[in-house]
């Protein structure tokens, strides 16, 4: 027997989720020697991803693009695990696998669950944490949104909000790779310094101390990657160039309030002939992503991502930091 800690969804919050109240750590015994049903595997979690969209699953049921978490059970998100024991010939002992799993140190996955899993070859020997970030779902989000919606061209300019996060970092790198310029916002001076000095962003600013409207009026832009929604989106609608494209990726400014900000100038979409489109990356075709992005990271063509690594499962403190912008970089829970 070993101890197995999990992060449990206890109660739906109305504002920011409070550690130990809405999310709780629970530890139980786990039998490593248990017999496995045919087709299943037993795995040890290596890394888990923390992403803003999880806040939307902390609710009392109701329809959405993603189901609510079950109360009293572990929350779930993307993770990389190492197979300890297998009753499935397609998933060998010792292999690392990627998919949606419980936030637990040890897991058992059925044959049906494994249909949504990928065996990671990791030929480039990247850190496993990259596979829940730049080489995982956030990276797939950046690639799809830029290619299919923003459709940036050389010489154009894109504004990226929430730019120091997992998705924003890769959006910036890919925009630069096609010869586009980048305007980027973040919520602290150290994040702005990172954007300027490490990611070579042409215009980076702290939205808490500088006027977003003033910066955008002084720097014409053709596309906007929206990670925040709210008042920033309203400002973008007033300042983006005619025929601009808006990639609606997230709205973290509205996730933790019972009174989301109401956009008052949506007619600008018509007046400026704008394209504004959202998407759920899990419903898209990611194509040759795993053949293209990991090698580019390994070669240095894409900068190594900035990560915020938390050791071990907590009571939800790391998730709260993510939602409040207190972390810096891709939030990852490491259980190695």
Image: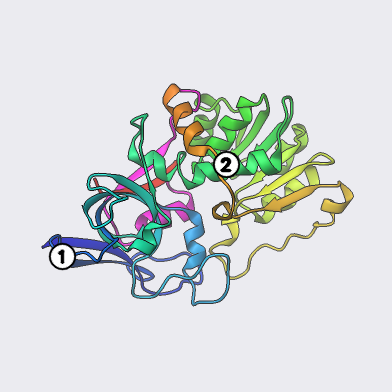
Q: Residue at x 77, y 33 (%)?
A: 220
Q: Residue furthest right?
A: 271
- Quadrant holding the N terminus: bottom left
N-terminal of the pair, mark 1 or mark 2, is 1
Percent coordinates x, y for residue 147 in the rendering? 65, 38
Q: Residue at x 15, y 65 (%)?
A: 34
Residue 258 drawn above or below residue 170:
below
Q: CA distance from mark 1 to mark 2?
A: 40 Å
Residue 117 drawn above or below residue 182:
below
Q: Is residue 324 magenta?
A: yes
Q: Is residue 187 visible?
A: no
**Residue identifier under label 1:** 34
Tag shown at residue 142:
2
Q: Which element type, helix, strand or loop, lies under badge 2?
A: helix
Q: Is residue 152 visible?
A: yes
Task: Find out whether the residues at labels 1 and 2 contact each other: C-beta distance under 8 Å.
Answer: no
Left or right of residue 327: residue 158: right
Q: Residue furthest left?
A: 1
Q: Which element type, helix, strand or loop, lies under badge 1?
A: loop
Q: Which residues are the magenta region?
A: 300-328
Left or right of residue 332: residue 248: right
């Amino acid at each position: 027997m070993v101890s197995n800690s999990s992060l449990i969804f206890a109660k739906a919050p109305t504002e920011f989720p409070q550690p130990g109240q809405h999310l709780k750590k629970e530890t139980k015994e786990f039998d490593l020697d248990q017999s496995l049903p045919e087709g299943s595997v037993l795995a040890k979690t290596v890394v888990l991803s923390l992403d803003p969209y999880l806040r939307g699953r902390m609710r009392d049921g109701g329809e959405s693009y993603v189901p609510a978490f079950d109360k009293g059970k572990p929350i779930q998100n993307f993770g990389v695990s190492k197979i300890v024991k297998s009753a499935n010939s397609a998933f060998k002992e010792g292999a690392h696998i990627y998919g949606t799993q419980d936030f637990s140190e040890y897991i058992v996955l059925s044959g049906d669950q494994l249909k949504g899993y990928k065996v990671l070859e990791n030929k480039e020997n990247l850190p496993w944490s990259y596979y829940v970030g730049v080489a995982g779902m956030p990276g797939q989000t950046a690639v799809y949104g830029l290619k299919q919606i923003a459709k940036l061209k050389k010489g154009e300019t894109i504004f990226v909000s929430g730019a120091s996060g997992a998705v924003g970092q890769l959006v910036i790198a890919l925009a630069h790779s096609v010869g586009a310029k980048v305007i980027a916002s973040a919520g602290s001076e150290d994040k702005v310094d990172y954007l300027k000095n490490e990611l070579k962003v042409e215009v980076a600013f702290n939205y808490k101390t500088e006027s977003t409207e003033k910066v955008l009026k002084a720097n014409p832009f053709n596309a906007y990657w929206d990670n925040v929604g709210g008042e920033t989106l309203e400002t973008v609608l007033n300042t983006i160039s005619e025929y601009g494209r808006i990639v609606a990726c997230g709205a973290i400014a509205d996730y933790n309030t019972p009174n989301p900000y109401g956009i008052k100038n949506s007619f600008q979409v018509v007046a400026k002939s704008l394209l504004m489109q959202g998407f759920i990356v899990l419903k898209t075709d990611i194509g040759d992503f795993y053949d293209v992005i990991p090698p580019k990271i390994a070669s240095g063509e894409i900068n190594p991502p900035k990560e915020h690594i938390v050791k071990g499962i907590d009571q939800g403190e790391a998730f709260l930091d993510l939602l409040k912008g207190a972390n810096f970089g891709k939030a990852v829970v490491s259980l190695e």
